[in-house]
């Protein structure tokens, strides 16, 4: 019979490049932890597993995991991003693989999102995995907000959820599941992306921009981004991550208002 850890272990390949395998500054468990991070990053686009998760996996205390990750970051093998809410409380930690170790990169894509440490950097994230990750999160959140499914995948507090639903009502995006059934597939996809973008904006340091958002503006920016995606397809400007493109375009548009 499998225990909890065995059931939760990712069924993905771990990759440990030679720079990590033979780094004398790293302890052997740290090298193994690096491999675990690559497996999780390959699945989700980044690793968000907690110290507690790793501690239970490798039978150590969370503080030990924290030191291992800090050491990996100090040596430049990973980069850590801390996500905070508007109250400056930590809500998530994201661990990215630093892809300066080019020998093991099967696929790369251009990441245009600005992170605290760098911009326009190549990350070792499978394009399909990255797409699947954001699409799955968009779907789960849409099902939770609109279809009333129980899983609060984005971990909104009760107060945040109430405020966000008020925002959707204000801009007339508070559709019911019954109404959604008569929508075309294209319009459902549009609604999913707009709602998720609003959620990201609502939880960000730019929340004030949601007060400027109107139904017309949200849809106008979406349609314009879709037209650009079609126009740029097959060119150097090809838009590989539509959500990121829409979200960034929306912020720029709302900042002009």
Image (cartoon, grey):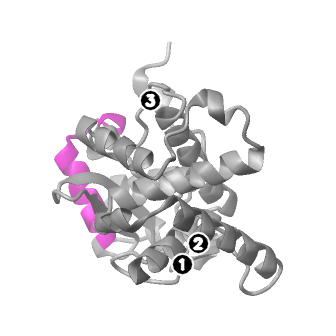
Who is closer to the viewer here, 114 or 179? 179
Asked whether residue 159 is drawn in magenta, I would say no
Q: Is residue 12 above or below residue 234?
A: above
Q: Reply above or below: 34 against 239.
A: above
The reply to whether residue 156 is in sight is: no
Q: Which residue is mark 1?
A: 112
Mark 1 surroundings within 10 Å by alpha-carbon count, few (fewer than 14), some (14 through 19), many (20 or more): some
Of residues 110 and 99, which is closer to you in this image? Answer: 110
Q: Horizontally, is 12 left or right of 211 in the view?
A: right
Per the image, label 1 sits on a secondary structure element best described as: loop
Q: Is residue 70 magenta?
A: yes
Residue 245, position as x, y percentages in the image: 58, 72
Please identify the residue farthest to the bottom as the structure is shown.
236
Circle 2: element type = helix
| Magenta stretch bounds | 56-73
Of the numbered discs in the image, which one, if any, rests on residue 245?
A: 2
Marks 1/2: CA distance? Answer: 9 Å
Along the viewing direction, whichever of 159 and 65 lies nearer the viewer? 159
Residue under circle 3?
A: 151
Is residue 32 placed above or below 231 in the rendered structure? Answer: above
Residue 213, image x and y in percent? 43, 64
How far is mark 3 from mark 2, CA to CA? 27 Å
Tag 1–tag 2 contact (CB < 8 Å): yes
Q: Earlier in the sequence, mark 1 or mark 2?
A: 1
What residue is rendered at 31% in x and 34% in y? 56
Q: Sort mark 2 into few (<14), some (14-19) or many (20+) by Cα contacts within 10 Å.
A: some
Q: Is residue 185 left or right of residue 88?
A: right
Q: Residue at x 21, y 44 (%)?
A: 62
Please tell me whether the stretch drawn in magenta is mainly helix, strand or loop. helix
């Amino acid at each position: 019979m499998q225990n909890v850890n065995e059931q939760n272990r990712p069924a993905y390949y771990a990759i440990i490049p030679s720079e990590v395998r033979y780094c004398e500054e790293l302890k052997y468990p740290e090298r193994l932890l690096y491999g675990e991070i690559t497996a999780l990053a390959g699945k989700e686009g980044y690793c968000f597993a907690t110290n507690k998760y790793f501690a239970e996996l490798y039978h150590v205390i969370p503080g030990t995991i924290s030191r291992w990750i800090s050491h990996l970051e100090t040596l430049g093998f990973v980069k850590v991003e801390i996500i905070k809410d508007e109250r400056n409380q930590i809500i998530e930690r994201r661990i990215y693989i630093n892809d300066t170790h080019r020998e093991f990169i099967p696929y790369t894509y251009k990441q245009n999102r600005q992170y605290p440490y760098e911009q326009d950097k190549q990350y070792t994230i499978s394009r399909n995995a990255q797409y699947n990750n954001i699409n799955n999160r968009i779907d789960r959140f849409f099902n939770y907000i609109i279809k009333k499914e129980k899983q609060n995948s984005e971990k909104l507090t009760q107060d945040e959820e109430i405020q966000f639903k008020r925002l959707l009502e204000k801009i007339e995006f508070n559709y019911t599941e019954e109404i959604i059934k008569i929508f075309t597939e294209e319009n459902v996809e549009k609604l999913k992306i707009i709602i998720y973008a609003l959620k990201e904006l609502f939880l960000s340091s730019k929340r004030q921009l949601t007060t400027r958002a109107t139904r017309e503006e949200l849809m106008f920016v979406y349609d314009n981004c879709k037209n650009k995606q079609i126009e740029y397809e097959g060119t150097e400007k090809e838009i590989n991550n539509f959500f990121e493109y829409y979200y960034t375009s929306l912020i720029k548009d709302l900042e002009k208002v």
